[in-house]
Image (cartoon, rainbow, N blue to C red):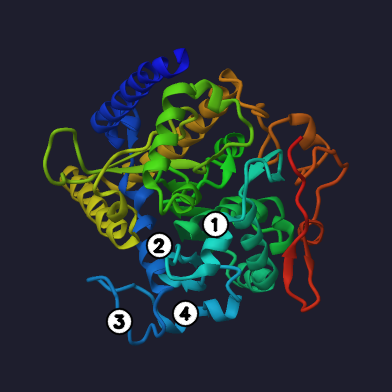
Amino acid sequence: MSILCGLPFLECIYCLACARWVWKRCLHNAGHDSETWGEATADDFEPVPRLCRYILAVKENDLRQPLRAPPQGYGVDPDCVVMKKSYTDTRGKVPPYLIYLDHDHADIVLAIRGLNLAKESDYAVLLDNKLGKMKFDGGYVHNGLLKAAGCILDAECEVLKELAEKYPNYTLTFTGHSLGSGVAALLTMVVVQNRDRLGNVDRKRIRCFAIAPARCMSLNLAVRYADDDFLPRTATPLEDIFKSLFCLPCLLCLRCMRDTCISEERMLKDPRRLYAPGRLYHIVERKPFRCGRLPPVVRTAVPVDGRFEHIILSCNATSDHALLWIEREAQWALELMREEDHTFEIPAKQRMERQKTLAKEHREEHEAALHRAVTLAVPHALLPSQYGTFDEKDDDAGDSSTGSSAKSTRKESWYELIDRLFERDESGHMVLKKPLLAD
């Protein structure tokens, strides 16, 4: 009887906690997370709307007669499309993608489309994961996305090597949206570690732009590879959303309890927790208590804590995640940046100096983020040597461990990596070997 008398009291406490959380979320705007960040420049942000259009082009069956092109078109020359893979070609193991030779911008682009709500195979890739299921390079990654990245590597490594050698002055850009962005991010990480298999391609040539990325890597990896560029748009993991598709109140309830009872410091210290990768660009177009959209402003930083960890209650959450909308807002933001540069009429010499200064600031910001990760006691967050591991001793040994903490005296080759993580089934298809589980 005494227990039953206490139930109303517990319900009141729970309702007050939920009301507090909802009040905070209704007042919390995504712009709060990036209010201390610096603004991006036109030169820095220029590839984003263009790459968005390339990703949109993957959805077209015939690029010579497009059906859903944006107002300014895709900007894709069909004759320069090296290959274009559909769901049939990938057998549903990877979202469709294309490889495009962008001669106008001296770029080799591999673009991967986002989640297709009508395709079961995309859900299978997204939901093929659980906390701490797959280790990679001293951290944790999304198991299904790593598997998809491995399938692309197995199919296209020779093509990419041939293009990289044929066009030595071209950059090599991996890009994707939503589900495809997670695949692109992990694909980039593996390529960076195994550049010798692309003809020793210069590290500076390799880039990744992940648009509205899925959470795909642990915090130490997200900060370590922050010299690449990402555009986050969703805080709640996509797999959590689809697991709770028919019980959204359950999802909000669980997130409420987590945000209320679990401190961010505790979440940062969980080495298995996945985050949006790399340097973040945030398109800000709304302010609290203001109706409609404002001219977009793009902010950028390499945050350690505060990487869009709060769920935002908004009727625009779905539309803001749509690639067509991101492309439009990104293009508008870029045009505003260029207008401002034109107004000040910056001479070419000063523009070049500004680009060098910007590159230096990005390096310093990256180093500061690594120091911040160490200060916050993020697991495995030790100061790195270049593109190896957070432990300088590991780099001296030439090792970048994947799926194991054992150290080696030489760097694991691309094909050894693929052979150890993947195997072929009876039909000859690549399948992921049984992953190492967290201790």
Q: Of helix, strand and loop, which one carries label 4? A: helix
Q: Cα distance, mark 1 to mark 3?
A: 28 Å
Q: CA distance from mark 3 to mark 4?
A: 19 Å
Query: Contact (CB < 8 A) between labels 3 and 4?
Result: no
Q: Which residue is mark 4?
A: 80
* Place of residue 266 in the rendered image (x, y in percent of width and height, measured from the top left): 55, 22
User: Dividing the image into 4 quarters, which one contains the N terminus?
Assistant: top left
Percent position of residue 362, x then y: 46, 36
Rendered image quadrant of residue 373: top right
Give me the C-alpha separation between circle 4 and circle 1: 31 Å
Say what amino acid the circle numbered 3 marks.
Leu
Sequence-first tag of 2 and 4: 2
Q: In this orientation, which residue lies closer to the viewer: 89 or 262? A: 262
Gap between marks 2 and 4 measured at Cα? 15 Å
What type is the residue that disc 4 sits on?
Cys
Q: Residues within 10 Å of mark 3 (few under 14, many from 20)?
A: few
Res. 67 mark: 3
Of callouts 1 and 3, the N-terminal one = 3
Which residue corresponds to mark 2? Answer: 51
Q: Is residue 387 above or below residue 303?
A: below
Question: Mark 3 or mark 4, which is nearer to you?
Answer: 3
Between 256 and 39, which is closer to the camera in this rendering? 256
Disc 1 vs disc 3: Cβ atoms closer than 8 Å? no
Q: Which residue is mark 1?
A: 126
Foreground residue, 201 or 169?
201
Q: Residues within 10 Å of mark 2 (few under 14, many from 20)?
A: many
Which quadrant, please, contains the C terminus? top right
